[in-house]
Amino acid sequence: MVAPRRHGLFAACALLVLSVTACQSRPDEIEDSGTRLSTAAGDILAATQNEAASTVVSAGPTVSLGPPAAPPSGQEGTDLYSLGFDLGSADAPVRIIEFSDYGCSFCRKFHMETWPTLKIDYIDTGKLLWKTVPFVIGNWANSVEASMGAECAVEQGKAEGMTALLFERQSDWKSVSDPAPPVASLAEAAGLDMTIYQTCLDESKYLWRVQAHSALARRVGVRGTPTFFVVGYGPLQGALPLDLFKQVIDTVLVEVEAQGR
């Protein structure tokens, strides 16, 4: 396991974007959910050194998912590597874990402006493995419905397309009284089998994963979205501009190559 470090560049980036490019949660204490994390997640936990738990609340009614339910019998547990969804080669030298909320405007900005180029230049070329962990920070009640829709898309291997549409057409579902129809419309546009999708929603099949994502984000100290953990280095918060994000990744690539990792 690589010892966690914080390069000066990462500290500078975090300070630069913290207050102006991230959606902030409104913390309040709750009982720790006790989400089980694999020992392989030590890079992230050591980088943050923050085990504090917080509730997720909104300006209006409280949006609280509670502790994660146990996964269905015979399915994967709630460790880091079984949550979220991955894009890129498992042998990539750089690994980044993204915590975002589908309702966050800065998350949308990142996915619309920065993500497409990062995918082409780093993920598609085998340099970067990207794990997306969508969670409910609590500021937008409809994010629960969006997250459930995304999990049902993961089941059908359509997570990337569904995520892109949820951000691109965020205004369609974010503030409406009933988000189910517009989210379902996006699922159909993403190419999902709608019979399977509706069964997934009716059975709340993957609610435990939405809960586990949110508990994991609290456990590692995420207080704003988007937050990115560069594994082995530490966290960055906010919708970093493309040039700055590329500078971060390029710096890590140079270090990894120099150390023969």
Image (tube, rainbow, N blue to C red):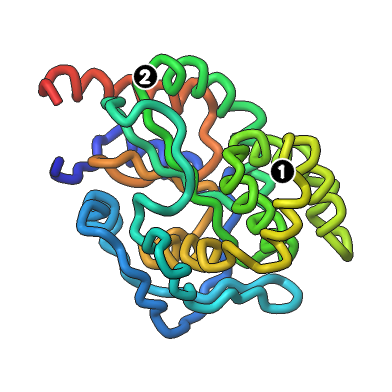
Judge by depth and name the residue closer to the eye, 197 or 93. 197
Q: Position of residue 38 (x, y in %)?
A: 26, 59
Q: Which of the 4 quarters of the picture holds residue 25? A: bottom right
Q: Which of the 4 quarters of the picture holds residue 245? A: top left
Q: Is residue 38 left or right of residue 107?
A: left
Label 2 CA crowd tier, 10 Å (few <14, some 14–19, many 20+): some
Are dots 2 and 1 in contact, CB under 8 Å? no
Q: Is residue 146 left or right of residue 257?
A: right
> Which sits earlier in the primary sequence, circle 2 or circle 1?
2
* 116 to 56, vertically: above or below: above
Judge by depth and name the residue closer to the eye, 118 or 183. 183
Is residue 20 visible in the rendered image? The answer is no
Mark 1 is on which residue type? Leu
Mark 2 is on which residue type? Gly
So how many labels did they put on this image? Answer: 2
Instruction: Write down the residue under mark 1.
Output: 166
Q: Report the Cα–Cα distance between label 2 and label 1.
A: 26 Å
Judge by depth and name the residue closer to the eye, 188 or 105. 188
Q: Name the residue: 82% across, 52% down.
A: 173
